[in-house]
Amino acid sequence: MTVHFGDRLYQAVRSKKTPLAVGIDPLYSQLPEAITGHKHMNDEYDAAAAVDALLEFSTQTLRIIAPLVPAVKINVAFFEKYQAEGIEAFYALMAEAHALGLVTIADVKRGDVGHAAKEYAAAYLAQPELVGLEDTVTPDAITINPFAGEDGIVPFVDIASQNGKGLFIWVRSSNPCAGLLQDFVGQDGQRFYQRLAGLVAGIANAKERIGQSGYSNVGMIVGGTSPEESGLLRQQYPSIWFLVPGLGAQGATVSDCIRFCRPDGTGALITASRSIIYAYHRPEYAERFGQDWKKAVEQAVNDAKTELARAMGA
Amino acid sequence: MTVHFGDRLYQAVRSKKTPLAVGIDPLYSQLPEAITGHKHMNDEYDAAAAVDALLEFSTQTLRIIAPLVPAVKINVAFFEKYQAEGIEAFYALMAEAHALGLVTIADVKRGDVGHAAKEYAAAYLAQPELVGLEDTVTPDAITINPFAGEDGIVPFVDIASQNGKGLFIWVRSSNPCAGLLQDFVGQDGQRFYQRLAGLVAGIANAKERIGQSGYSNVGMIVGGTSPEESGLLRQQYPSIWFLVPGLGAQGATVSDCIRFCRPDGTGALITASRSIIYAYHRPEYAERFGQDWKKAVEQAVNDAKTELARAMGA
């Protein structure tokens, strides 16, 4: 039987003893020379070579991080410019991550009005019944954009729930200009993202959404760099898993991020992307590990875990 | 030299003498038997057969509509569940529509924080420099989701502008629940979508965005079913092309839609999707044309054009 997504994530975070998740957003230009120097991968302007390089780098990264963290988030934006081959690589990575025991999150940020939302949901959350695609390993959860409103969200929730999958709904992002729209203050003093969180919680807190761990399969994305009062969402919505991007390259500190964890260390997945996967470009790791990019990535994961654990007082 | 997107759309709407655009959102289950009855396309559960059917239906539809309307909008949501093959079909349709002289809009509703937005923009708006993909015909314009705010929008605007392409930014959608979030009233009485429209207009109205026709290459999506006062956007932002979905199946009437046109009939692209591409399921056309689904589609386009022209007093 399929384990409820909220429970699966709970077990994964408990067993790895960290809320850290790694985000894979690979750009060819940032890959280590050990990858791009390979004869068949050393041409950024050849689609097949570039995709091979992304796939090789991401696969090796998955193998490094799998024993260390509960989950991986892979952003499809970095694969779409390679069209069909990029999409094949994206699904290959989902399968690899799943085989390695990671909880897999596809960062696709899809969103549309109802009848199109249903098609996006079927694409990423249902097991394909199609001959030719039946071996696809779809992600355990996806990220979605809620701008359309409830009837653009519900098709994702329905299809996720029918398939034992999860969702993370974008509520407050981590980019510098996020506040301009998302913090828009309403007539009652409520901010836009708070209203949105209320709408999402109304859906997420339905009894049938909640697993044995007490968590819903429908979570929220709230950036580590969000305004201080967004930490109240943790108290307000105890059943919610928060996906918290922005640690490292986007400027969030560990204390910005851990405010979304419950005291037991569950309840938030804190994702670091560029600061981990490109650790070999960071002076402190470059100096120490030189060309051994894998050691740099591994050390960056362990350092981030230690920093998070220390901040949580463990 | 590349023609400015705002000008290209202006010329297309003037020469076809209608603001009608057709939306292609093909579902296998809705296709005519003349397509799905073909031996190699009659298996909904075979990915290759299903994609062949979607491609055949959509190609034939493009050929019917190309002499009649200025533009086509193709929604990628209906292709993504077929993964790599679906994406190939999507790009094949873009090339076909372009070859037929239609202005092509890819309805992808992508949106993310800046560094990922840049990757999405490159995927859909730049001409691939990649060996293996150099023959790709990218769309003339795409739809985007502005939820991230300005730094999630600007990468799309930059890459569109560098490539002579256009954007339609989702401001107020046409689905029943859209108002719940998008009509959220701020402290100064301004609605969320109005603030968003102001943000988009600030970007779209920069001098270098405006073509000889007086239109920007950055437009807005405003549903035909939007609240009455949204018609003020037309007066407020004279340089904006509005993409107006919702005519027909989503419940907008012609008068709901034409309020976004200027008196000369330009300034809005009014899209009808299911009411046109599935016209053969509508009793009035089924009765008249029977199995001849192409005649039904053609007649539905002509009827919608006539209705729009009449309402505009032409």
Image (cartoon, coloured by chain):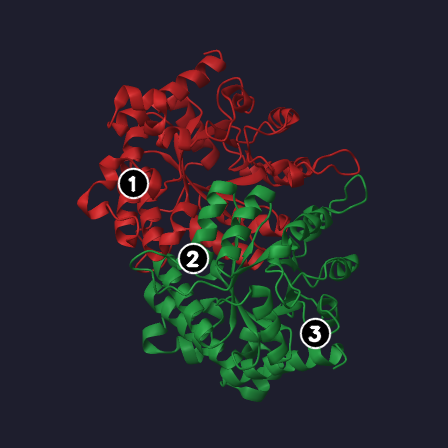
Chain colours: A green, B red
| Chain letter behind tag 2 | A
| Residue B145 in picture, x, y percent from top left | 56, 46
Observer-side mark, 2 or 3, equals: 3
Determine the CA span between mark 3 and mark 1.
54 Å
Which is nearer the eye, B105 or B85? Answer: B85
Which is nearer the eye, B12 or B275? Answer: B275
Mark positioned earlier in the residue sequence (2 or 3): 2
**Residue position for label 3:** A265
**Residue position for label 1:** B96
Which is nearer the eye, B16 or B160? Answer: B16
| Residue B274 in picture, x, y percent from top left | 41, 33
Q: Number of labelled discs? A: 3
| Label ID, residue A54 | none
Q: Left or right? Give the position of B75 relative to A252.
A: left
Quadrant hosting residue B10: top left
SS class, disc 1 = helix
Three-letter amino acid code at the position of disc 3? Gly
Neighbour class for label 2 at 10 Å: few (<14), some, many (≥20)? many
Identify whether B216 is placed above or below A149.
Answer: above
Neighbour class for label 1 at 10 Å: few (<14), some, many (≥20)? some
Does residue B201 show up?
no
Is label 2 on the same chain as label 1?
Answer: no
| Residue B210 in picture, x, y percent from top left | 54, 34
SS class, disc 2 = helix
**Residue position for label 2:** A80
Q: Quadrant of the C terminus of chain A?
A: bottom right
Three-letter amino acid code at the position of disc 1? Glu
SS class, disc 3 = loop
